[in-house]
Image (tube, helix red, strand yellow):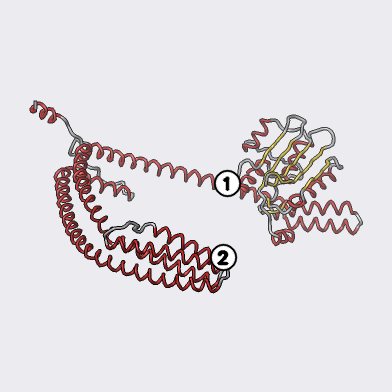
Amino acid sequence: MIHKIRKLIGKIRFSIQTKIVGVCILANMLVFVMDMILLVGLNNMSSSIEQVYQENVTLNTLAEALTEVQDSMTTYLSVKTSDSLENYYRNEQNFAKMLDTLNNQITGDEYGRMERSIRNMSEQYLSMTSQTIEAKRGRNVEKYRVRYESATDMYHYISTYINSLNSDQLQANSEKYVELSRSFRSFEMVCVWIMVCVMVANVIIAIKLTGTIIAPLKMLAGRADEVAEGNFDIELLEIYSKDEIATVTNAFNSMVTSIREYIEQIQMNMKVEQEFRERELKMETHLKEAELKYLQAQINPHFLFNTLNAGAQLAMMEDADRTYEYIQNMSEIFRYTVRRGDEIVTLRDELTLVDHYIFVLNVRFSGEIHYEKQVDEELLNVEIPSMIVQPIVENCVNHGIREMEGKGRIVVSVYKENEHVCICIRDNGKGMSSAMIDKVMKGEYRKETKASGSNGIALDNVIARLRYFTGTTDCVRILSEGEKCGTQIIITLGERRLSEEDVSDNACR
């Protein structure tokens, strides 16, 4: 039977984990048993040593509590305040609780008799202090003086008695402590030697049983450190065995190979993407340069300013007030467009530009556009990118109102909603379909108006700049119930305001 069991065990292939776990369990069990034995012994000896001076500690604490009672009574007799009286009662209760721990039985032990005497005298002392306090509160000067002197004499006698008992016990306990200390040191040495023997035995067992697997693991760890430092050009490990280490080594080699291929692929993709971005950036730069050159080639801004101002002065000299006002509004529109194309301005500036624009349109088209503002004056200094509101109003005119029959109407509202500043531009034009709104919001619709007076800024450009400015994608909403139902464009901003100095600087430009 025993032969069959040995033969069966020989056929079982133990894994490295099983071997290591078995060695660890045996070593830990040995250490645990020895630790428990030593711990029990140490605890017993420590408890004995702690109990040696416990009686001295109790007497010292009792003496301190007695002194606190005497001091608090004296303090109250001197100052007679509610705080000092409360302090006395608190110290009295604490001292009374400590007296309950003293011996109160008749015994033949000398220390027991002394404790019983201390307890009886202390109870008499507390009675005297209470009578002294009551006499003081009753303003019986002669009575509380006599009782205070008696209590003080009793206090000194009890203190002396406690010190005497404490001294006797300290001397006896010191002799006992010396004996326990010697035994404790001897036991410590035994514990140290036992633990050293156990540790040496565990080390020898671990070295014998794990020596065959440490070398390949060290090699694997060294290569792993190199990979962690970013070196993926290491030489792959050779596999000598067929156990779990061989499996891990094979997986490590495969991982390093895969990482190499992945890095090469990433580098190739990054190179292609960088080339694509460079081409895209160059195209965008060329496009912007072309647009700028186109605008610059159209007209000289200084020449147009001078021309418009000269025309305004001429109209004023000839008393043509209507013509003067028209030219002044045109001049303000052009100056705002050229100078503030990429600035952060206030809502006041944007709405003033809309006023100039509507005035010019109504002069051109004989007042066909009815314009109305509903503005919260407290929100006029809120920050907004320039050329936002006017292009939307222009879009309402060119694509909504002009293509309808009857008189057009545009309403611009500025109000606060849920800690956000809202700008609503509403018209009664032909409206927009849901498909058209989706295209505009997705930036798929770039129908730039070439009508007279257009500034060339499309609605999708306005939406893109607002999204960049606010950092959100839902800062613009377009609402329309369909054909001939008009359109609402609602802008939602955070309540960021320009300082008074910035507002003044913008006004001077």
Q: Amino acid at mark 1?
A: Glu
Q: Nearer the viewer, mark 2 or mark 1?
A: 2
Please, is residue 301 above or below residue 267 in the view?
A: below
Residue 211 screen position, x and y as percent = 16, 45
Residue at screen point 10% across, 28% down: 7
Q: Is residue 165 left or right of residue 403?
A: left
Horizontal relation, residue 265 to residue 452: left or right: left
Identify the residue shown where x is 72% and y is 44%. 423
Q: Amino acid at mark 2?
A: Ser
Along the line of sight, the residue nearer the viewer: 362 or 292: 362
Q: CA distance from mark 2 to mark 1?
A: 86 Å
**Is residue 49 rendered to the left or right of residue 294?**
left
Q: Along the polypeptide, which appears first: circle 2 or circle 1?
A: 2
Using the image, tell me which numbered label, if any, was put on residue 82.
2
In the rendered view of the protein, which quadrant contains the N terminus? top left
Nearer to us in this view, 100 or 476: 100
Determine the secondary structure under disc 1: helix
Disc 1 designates what residue?
284
Crowding near pointer 2: few (<14 within 10 Å), some, many (20+)? few
Toward the viewer: 395 or 488? Answer: 488
Toward the right, the furthest residue is 319
The reply to whether callout 2 and callout 1 are in contact (CB within 8 Å) is: no
Circle on res. 305: none
Secondary structure type for disc 2: helix
* Residue 132 on image: x %, y %: 50, 68
